[in-house]
C-alpha cells in the first residue's frame, strides 16, 4: 500500500488515500489528479496547491519530480467585491471575460474590503477613497430639490387674492427669499443651514 494525495481541478489538495499496487505488476497507478508527494501543512486561510507543467491527462502527472506543492491563499469563503462598483462578487463568475476561482492572489478588479459608501471609489494604492466631489454634488442636488419643493408649496400663499394677514405675508415672502438665496451661501447644502419656515406654516398645510 502507498499513500497518495488527491487534488481537485484547481490543484488543491483535498484528501489522502491508500493505494494498492496493481496485482499484475505491483506498480502503483495514480488516480486522476492524484500525486505521490505529500502536501505541506498550511495555516488558516491557506491551502496546498500542486503546481505542474504536466497536464492532468498525462500519466506522468503526480509522479515524483513532475511538480511541486505551493501554499496558496484560499478566499473561497471570503466575501469579495468588484473594485469597479463595490458589488459583491460570486466566486467563479465571469466579469469581462475573466473569473476568479477563490484560490491565489486576488486580481486587481477584486477586493475583500466592502465599499464603505456609495460615494467611495477604488484606488489601486489606497483602496476605497471617498469621492468628496461626487458626495457634495449629490448633497447639493438633494438640497436644491428640497428648496424647490418648499418654494412651490408656498406659491399659493403669495397670490394677490389669497386671504392672509400682512404680517404673515411678509414672513412667507422673507422665507421664500431665504430659500432662493440659500444655494449661494457658504453653508449650503448643510442640512443645519436650511432656512426655517414660519411656525404657523405647518398649521395651514396640515
Image (tube, rainbow, N blue to C red):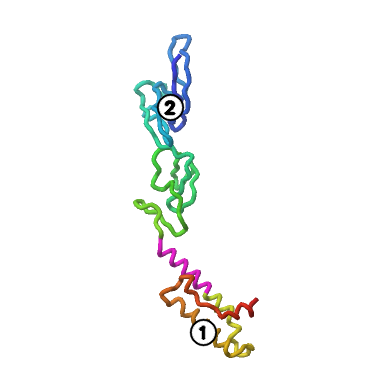
Looking at the image, the residue that sits furthest to the top is 24
Do tag 1 and tag 2 residues touch (Cβ < 8 Å)? no
Residue found at x 58% / y 82% = 155
The magenta region covers 131-146
Q: Is residue 151 above or below residue 42?
A: below
Q: Quadrant of residue 35?
A: top left
Q: Main secondary structure of the magenta part?
A: helix
Residue found at x 49% / y 80% = 180
Residue found at x 46% / y 77% = 182
Q: Position of residue 193 (x, y in %)?
A: 47, 74
> In the image, 4: left or right of 66?
right
Kindly identify which residue carries mark 1. Answer: 174
Q: Position of residue 160 (x, y in %)?
A: 60, 90
Q: Is residue 72 above or below residue 138?
A: above
What kind of element bears circle 1? Answer: helix
Q: Position of residue 171 (x, y in %)?
A: 55, 85
What kind of element bears circle 2? Answer: loop
Looking at the image, the residue that sits furthest to the front is 199
Between 151 and 178, the residue placed more toward the observer is 178
Estimate how packed mark 1 is, as few (under 14), some (14 to 19) or many (20 or more) residues with alpha carbons within 10 Å.
some
Estimate how packed mark 2 is, as few (under 14), some (14 to 19) or many (20 or more) residues with alpha carbons within 10 Å.
some
Between 12 and 164, the residue placed more toward the observer is 164
Between 29 and 166, the residue placed more toward the observer is 166
Kindly identify which residue carries mark 2. Answer: 56
Q: Position of residue 186 (x, y in %)?
A: 41, 75
Residue 139 in the magenta stretch? The answer is yes
Q: Which mark is residue 2?
A: none
Between 55 and 83, the residue placed more toward the observer is 83
Viewport quadrant of the C terminus:
bottom right
Amino acid at each position: 500500500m502507498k499513500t497518495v494525495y488527491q487534488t481537485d481541478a484547481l490543484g488543491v489538495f483535498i484528501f489522502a488515500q491508500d493505494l494498492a499496487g496493481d496485482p499484475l505488476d505491483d506498480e502503483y497507478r495514480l488516480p486522476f489528479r492524484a500525486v505521490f508527494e505529500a502536501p505541506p501543512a498550511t495555516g488558516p486561510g491557506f491551502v496546498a496547491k500542486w503546481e505542474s507543467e504536466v497536464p492532468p491527462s498525462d500519466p506522468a502527472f503526480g509522479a515524483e519530480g513532475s511538480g511541486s506543492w505551493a501554499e496558496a491563499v484560499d478566499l473561497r469563503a471570503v466575501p469579495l467585491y468588484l473594485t469597479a462598483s463595490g458589488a459583491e462578487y460570486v466566486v467563479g463568475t465571469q466579469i469581462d471575460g475573466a473569473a476568479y476561482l477563490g484560490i491565489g492572489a486576488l486580481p486587481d478588479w477584486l477586493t475583500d474590503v466592502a465599499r464603505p459608501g456609495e460615494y467611495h471609489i477604488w484606488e489601486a494604492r489606497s483602496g476605497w477613497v471617498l469621492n468628496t466631489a461626487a458626495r457634495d454634488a449629490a448633497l447639493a442636488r438633494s438640497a436644491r430639490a428640497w428648496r424647490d419643493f418648499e418654494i412651490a408649496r408656498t406659491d399659493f400663499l403669495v397670490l394677490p387674492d389669497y386671504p392672509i394677514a400682512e404680517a404673515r405675508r411678509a414672513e412667507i415672502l422673507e422665507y421664500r427669499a431665504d430659500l432662493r438665496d440659500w444655494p449661494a451661501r457658504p453653508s449650503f447644502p448643510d442640512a443645519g443651514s436650511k432656512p426655517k419656515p414660519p411656525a404657523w406654516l405647518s398649521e395651514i398645510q396640515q
